[in-house]
Image: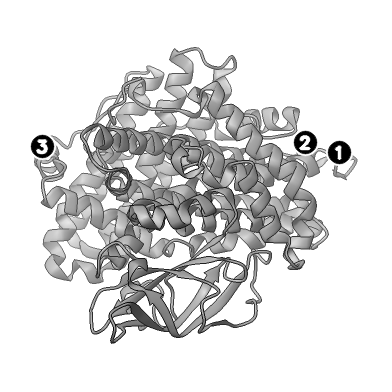
């Protein structure tokens, strides 16, 4: 496979791509599978037995388990070998995140340490800072936390009031302020703290050791879910931070925070896959054991529909996450080969795919919410009992729509990022829009399976692209206040990316002969296409109704109907076949 990224960030909307040029999960090599298996084995043998103890905040347990993960090398997957890390690729790191993602609160603590806790130092730290701290974080000798959010600064991170003032002798910054919702706060040794120096308008970032004088904490927060993760408020009262612990340049903190959030978003898209698998396995195991009216409930069509839709959400999320992850990895490697430093190559490589990172955070978190909700429903009354594990999955899932920027913020980021790339001519968005304006006729269906799927996606792209300039012209600079319409467009883009990624995966599986039972994968694709085309239709209809009236609305409705035309198929039987495989295997094995 080519090491050059198949598309730039956001280009999926304007360019067609062959299945030959995408990575799919079936292509992980033996070493990557072994690393993933080791991660999974660690969760099942060392962590799973303590899920209840973790939720009850058993003293010292979470840091102990994190340190065990460090001893196995799992905390240093993405850290270079010179700092006692594993030095693995972005794609491998994502696969490990998937496996760890099934571990409820432990996965939150793990991701906070390896992601937002370690990556600011890894990507922005200088050699002295690396030498002092990085090996400790990679091995688990020290644990890390990330201090950005404040009581008055959530989504608007730069509104934070924490301040750093240079001491008279110029040797320290005196840090004062408050941070809240800080994961790993109760046991972290190293804090990445964001604050404004003097009267700066923009944040800077500092490496702060947790045992320095002047740092105090509130008790653990009592949360709806992820109860086992340590979440506390931290107060900084005249904390003396050596000037050499400024991370990056003065005023670079806001950029550091944003770029680390890009990573966190795509990583969350992978992490939820592990949680999805665990919830599906719990659902089908219960359905294969529970009898009602003299029959196993897994034999009932209503239950099979739920099981099948759980599978479709998971399979499609996998397809999109690993497609994007390989593009990110290839872009990072291109930057490295061009001479960029390690940190800059990673930062810029991930930032290139800002829209994909934002969309996959949304799709993954909302898919997991759907899956655990249906899991509770499959369990019936038992699903509402804290005695069953699906209840923990349901509670723990909810935070993912808030983590790494709320889903509303991420929807707005996705559409804003793509249109800005077009305006700056980083992608040929507006050139493509002018081209499709000249030909809005739908692509023809020929009866050939993959051709018709690609034709449908081309039609849906035409629709999305046609609406972008209409709403921009209608509202001008006031469009930023039309968040509902922007989120309609964002959902159309997101669903297109997921649908196309799943199509390319199934087509590659088929044409490369990677699976024996290709028919069930076509069923998954057919169900997804059916569901997402309806969703795109609904988003477009809402958008059109929000800005068009009379004759213009009628014309757009006619165009909408033409470009979303989909031949009916027996979705009921397709779901039953997908559920049938799940029920027979008694676990997610797709």
Q: Give coordinates of residue 172: x percent, y percent.
A: 35, 78
Residue 489 x %, y %: 29, 54
Residue occupied by mark 2: 299
| 70 to the left or right of 260 | right
Residue at left offset 74%, top offset 27%: 584
How is colour applied across the structure in the image? one colour
Q: Which residue is mark 3?
A: 435
Reply above or below: 445 against 549. Answer: above
Quick one: which residue is furthest to the front in this view? Answer: 169
Corner quadrant of residue 129: bottom left
Question: What's the CA distance linking mark 1 and mark 3?
Answer: 57 Å
Secondary element at image label 2: helix
Q: Earlier in the sequence, mark 1 or mark 3?
A: 1
- Indicate the position of residue 475 as horizontal and vertical percent values: 15, 66
Contact between marks 2 and 1 (CB within 8 A): the answer is: yes
Q: How many numbered discs, if any?
A: 3
Q: Nearer the viewer, mark 3 or mark 2?
A: 3
């Amino acid at each position: 496979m080519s090491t050059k990224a198949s598309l730039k960030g956001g280009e999926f909307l304007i360019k067609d791509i062959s299945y030959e040029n995408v990575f799919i999960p079936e292509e992980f090599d033996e070493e990557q599978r072994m690393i993933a298996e080791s991660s999974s084995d660690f969760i099942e043998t060392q962590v799973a037995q303590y899920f209840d103890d973790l939720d009850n905040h058993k003293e010292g347990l979470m840091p102990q388990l994190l340190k065990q993960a460090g001893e196995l090398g799992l905390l240093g997957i993405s850290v270079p070998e010179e700092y006692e890390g594993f030095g693995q690729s972005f794609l491998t790191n994502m696969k490990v995140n998937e496996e760890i993602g099934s571990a409820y609160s432990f996965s939150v603590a793990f991701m906070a340490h390896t992601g937002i806790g370690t990556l600011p130092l890894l990507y922005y730290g200088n050699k002295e800072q690396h030498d002092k701290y990085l090996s400790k974080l990679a091995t688990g000798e020290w644990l890390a936390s990330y201090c950005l959010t404040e009581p008055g600064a959530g989504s608007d991170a730069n509104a934070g009031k924490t301040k750093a003032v240079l001491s008279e002798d110029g040797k320290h910054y005196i840090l004062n302020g408050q941070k809240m919702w800080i994961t790993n706060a109760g046991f972290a040794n190293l804090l990445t703290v964001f604050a404004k120096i003097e009267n700066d308008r923009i944040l800077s970032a500092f490496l702060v050791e947790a045992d320095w004088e002047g740092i105090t904490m509130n008790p653990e927060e009592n949360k709806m879910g992820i109860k086992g993760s340590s979440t506390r408020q931290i107060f900084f009262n005249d904390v003396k931070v050596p000037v050499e612990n400024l991370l990056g340049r003065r005023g670079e903190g806001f950029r550091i925070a944003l770029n680390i959030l890009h990573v966190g978003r795509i990583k969350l898209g992978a992490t939820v896959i592990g949680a999805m698998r665990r919830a599906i396995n719990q659902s089908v195991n219960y359905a294969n054991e529970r009898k009602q009216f003299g029959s196993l409930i897994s034999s009932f069509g209503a239950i099979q529909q739920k099981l099948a839709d759980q599978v479709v959400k998971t399979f499609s999320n996998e397809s999109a996450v690993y497609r994007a992850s390989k593009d990110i990895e290839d872009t990072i490697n291109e930057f490295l080969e061009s001479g960029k430093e390690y940190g800059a190559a990673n930062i810029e490589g991930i930032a290139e795919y800002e829209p994909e990172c934002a969309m996959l955070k949304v799709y993954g978190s909302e898919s997991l919410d759907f899956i655990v909700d249906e899991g509770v429903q499959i369990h019936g009354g038992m699903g509402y009992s804290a005695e069953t594990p699906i209840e923990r999955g349901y509670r723990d899932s909810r935070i993912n729509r808030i983590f790494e920027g709320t889903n509303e913020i991420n929807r707005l980021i996705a559409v804003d990022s793509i249109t800005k790339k077009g305006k700056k001519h980083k992608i040929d968005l507006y050139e493509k829009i002018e081209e499709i304006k000249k030909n809005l006729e739908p692509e023809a269906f020929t009866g050939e399976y993959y051709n018709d799927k690609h034709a449908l996606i081309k039609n849906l792209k035409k629709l999305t692209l046609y609406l972008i300039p209409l709403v921009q012209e209608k509202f001008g600079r006031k469009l930023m206040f039309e968040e509902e319409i922007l989120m309609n467009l964002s959902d159309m883009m997101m669903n297109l990316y997921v649908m196309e990624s799943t199509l390319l995966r199934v087509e590659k599986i088929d044409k490369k002969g990677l699976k024996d039972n290709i028919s069930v994968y076509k069923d998954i694709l057919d169900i997804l296409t059916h569901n997402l085309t309806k969703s795109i239709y609904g988003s477009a209809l809402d958008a059109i109704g929000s800005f068009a009236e009379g004759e213009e609305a009628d014309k757009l409705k006619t165009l909408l109907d033409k470009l979303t035309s989909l031949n009916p198929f027996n979705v009921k039987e397709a779901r039953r076949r997908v559920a049938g495989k799940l029920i027979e295997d008694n676990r997610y094995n797709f």
